[in-house]
Image (cartoon, rainbow, N blue to C red):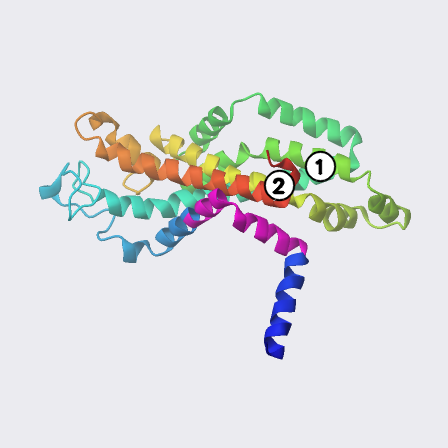
Amino acid sequence: MTEQKVVAKRRRRSWRKTRTGMILERLGQNKLAMIGLIIIALLAFMAIFAPVIAPYSPTYQDFSAIYCKPNGEHWFGCDALGRDIFSRCVYGARYSLSLGLAATVFGSAIGLFFGVIVGYIGGRTDNLVMRLMDIVSAIPGMLLAVIISTALGSGFFNTILAMSVGTIPGTIRQTRALCLKERQMEYIEASVSVNCPKLKIMFSHMLPNIISPLIVGMTMGIGFTIRGAAGLSFIGLGIQPPTAEWGAMLSDGRSMILLHPHLMLFPGLMIALTVLSFNLFGDGLRDALDPRLKD
């Protein structure tokens, strides 16, 4: 064995001993998590390269192919306006994935920020914020999204805002609980004893040590957000036609579900597959970050 191979082998061993290396190794051993990750990667690839993958424009109408069933030319069939359903599903991945990711990140960032503050400071600030979150949590998440969408109107950015609000209370509660436990650690007491600034303690010392379970929650939350956004579009409060969005496609085909089930079948499968893939990957990521949580 040459000297270069020996050095490379030692580097691989030292990398595996690091925390990141062990997490990635455990994650790679989880077959279901890898299946979920592969599906997510394929969906992301499909969304990015939709103009190349889709054989037709999502708004192109072929009136000779109205309600045609799946065939060699139109893999998923066509809708009431002769639009290719496969092309619309491909383009729909752009809106669904970007909407789910943006709403989850936006809502989680707000929840994480306030959760760290109330978890560390406590006192009246903690009581005020948590009572406010109790009020918001008393309203079902989907109903809250419907109320916000009705007040602001439909559209891509309004849908992001409506879906992100529902993620804030849960993130604040989870972050607060983690901070309450973490602030009892000795390194926090040491930081306070040397007059370290509170903001530095909260966001430079505490946050990196509690971020792992929050990342898991965000990963699994993306799937639920995509499902909720599709629900808003289904009832006419989310993305509006003729935009190719999976929930809106379900709404367009519901009146013809008995005669032409393919109108709802394929958009529904895309939603189910996306939510399932994020759940599988989130479960695997949770087990990789903390093997003690594994059943």
Q: Amino acid at mark 1?
A: Leu
Residue 171, horizontal then vertical, whole percent: 61, 35
Which residue, as the protein is rendered here, is positioned at the far front? 1
Left or right of 215? Residue 251 is: left
Earlier sequence position, callout 1 versus callout 2:
1
Q: Quadrant of the N terminus?
A: bottom right
Q: Is residue 126 visible?
A: yes
Residue 115, horizontal then vertical, whole percent: 68, 37
Q: Is residue 29 above or below residue 135?
A: below
Q: Residue at x 53, y 48 (%)?
A: 29
Q: Residue at x 60, y 77 (%)?
A: 4
SS assignment at label 2: helix
Q: Please say if the residues under marks 1 and 2 sit with CB atoms less than 8 Å apart.
A: yes
Give the residue at mark 2: 214
What segment carries the magenta color? 18-38
Q: Within the magenta stretch, is there residue 224? A: no
Q: Residue at x 24, y 31 (%)?
A: 253
Residue 263, horizontal then vertical, whole percent: 23, 34
Give the residue at mark 1: 178
SS assignment at label 1: helix
Q: Is residue 151 above or below residue 1?
A: above
Q: Amino acid at mark 2?
A: Leu
